[in-house]
Image (spheres, grey):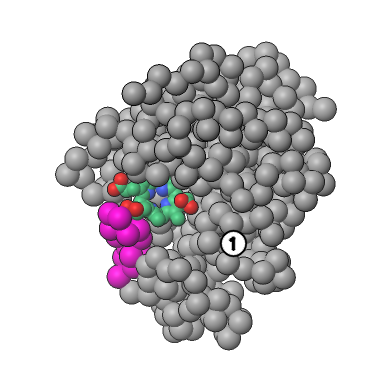
Amino acid sequence: MPATTPDRPALLTALQGARPARTPVWFMRQAGRSLPEYRAARHGIAMLDACLDPALAAELTLQPVRRHGVDAAVFFSDIVVPVLRAGVGVQIRSGVGPVLDEPVRTAADVAALPTPDPDLGPVVDGVRAAVAELGDTPLLGFAGAPFTLACYLVEGGPSKDHLRTRTLMHADPQAWAGVMAWAADVTGTFLRAQVAAGAAAVQLFDSWAGVLSAADYRAHVAPWSSRALAGLDVPVVHFAAQGGELLAELRDVAAGAVRHAAVGVDHRVPLDEASRRLGGTTPVQGNIDPAMLAAPWEVLAAHVRDVLRRGEAAPGHVVNLGHGVPPNADPDVLTAIVRLVHGEHPQHESG
Ligand code: CP3
């Protein structure tokens, strides 16, 4: 059992596979359009410009911590920030997502990628500013996993099936290795920069890995995600949306790279079943169904209690949603979930 001290942040205790006095909770995409103060601060500023303004990024990181009392801040940035800072043209279109100036689809496109050496000065300054203001609340850094970045690079934008990406994986192994090595190095540099600037843990988002079979994941993706995590000395949460068939693979990648590996679980697999698939020794994060946020409070509260109960099957549990906060979520509902998880005032006053 890892040693725990009473003043150790609950997030870190849970990620080490132990049970803190109260279960920690944060929300993927907790900084964002669900918050009126976010919409006011972002007004007229493009997403990637906001990410590269250290003072603004720090402020947007802190907003949900102040409002909800969550157990972690997540650094306000985006998975494509290191891609942009390495010199690849990309924008984030509101309501769409990242869109590349030029997709990377052939061996020649891969060869023409710039050196995977992003200039992350503004990210480092933003993390430092956030950490300085956070006090005892840990800052979680994050990055996109190489496969998820490759999906944007190859498709050129959001896609449903990622067919071009999956075809490239099998049709041209050398071009595939080139694009994955590039993405691993860019995203690994982004993670290490956040940790060096004070992030206490990181989450690797493989948002689209759920489209892969476990065999393809192991052969064509896992080695590159391992490369992205190499050399980190903080706990890692490894998450794939729709990743229920990949839980053991996600664990193996993170556990092969760092001492404390946890797995993020989306809402499709109950946490007791997820913990069984993980062999019962890996901390889990999740998995409130984002759709429940708009359900009547008693329905949502029963679901949250069920998530807490099933999470007891794992050695450590960090409560989160199964995927990001929807932009139209009621922020008061998120605050009420935090109170319920912390065992305070479990009633949400609605309407
Ligand atoms: O609070 C947090 O979680 C921290 C910030 C964060 C953002 N993006 C800010 C953001 C994090 C962790 C991300 C990660 C991210 N970005 C992922 C992985 C997580 C996941 O959802 O699976 C992915 C796939 C992206 C790419 C991306 N960026 C998408 C699909 C979008 C949404 C586009 C839209 O408008 O619907 C973005 C933009 C984005 N990233 C926003 C935020 C707050 C919204 C931009 C805005 O407010 O204008």
Residue 174 in sight from this viewpoint: no
State left or right for residue 163 relative to residue 281. Answer: left
State left or right for residue 327 relative to residue 230. Answer: left
State left or right for residue 289 relative to residue 51. Answer: right
**Residue at image coords 40%, 65%:** 158
Image coords of residue 318 (percent x, y): 62, 33
Give the quadrant of the C terminus. Answer: top left
State which quadrant residue 117 falls in: bottom left
Image coords of residue 233 (percent x, y): 65, 40
**Residue at image coords 62%, 45%:** 264
> Farthest residue toward the left?
44
Give the quadrant of the N terminus. Answer: top right
Q: Residues within 10 Å of mark 1 (few under 14, many from 20)?
A: some
User: Which residue, given by chain and number where applicable, does mark 1 sit on?
Assistant: 210
The answer to whether 150 is drawn above or below residue 192 in the figure is: below
**Residue at image coords 30%, 50%:** 48
Residue 163 in sight from this viewpoint: yes
State which quadrant residue 210 falls in: bottom right
State which quadrant residue 160 falls in: bottom left
Q: Please say whether residue 95 is one of the residues in the magenta stretch.
A: yes
Q: Secondary structure at mark 1?
A: helix
The answer to whether 210 is drawn above or below residue 294 in the figure is: below
Q: Nearer the viewer, residue 255 or 263?
A: 263
- Stretch of the chain drawn in magenta: 87-101
Image coords of residue 257 (percent x, y): 70, 50
The answer to whether 213 is drawn above or below residue 258 in the figure is: below
Q: Nearer the viewer, residue 195 or 248?
A: 248
Q: Amino acid at mark 1?
A: Gly
Image coords of residue 26 (percent x, y): 52, 32
State left or right for residue 36 relative to residue 247. Answer: left
**Residue at image coords 54%, 81%:** 167
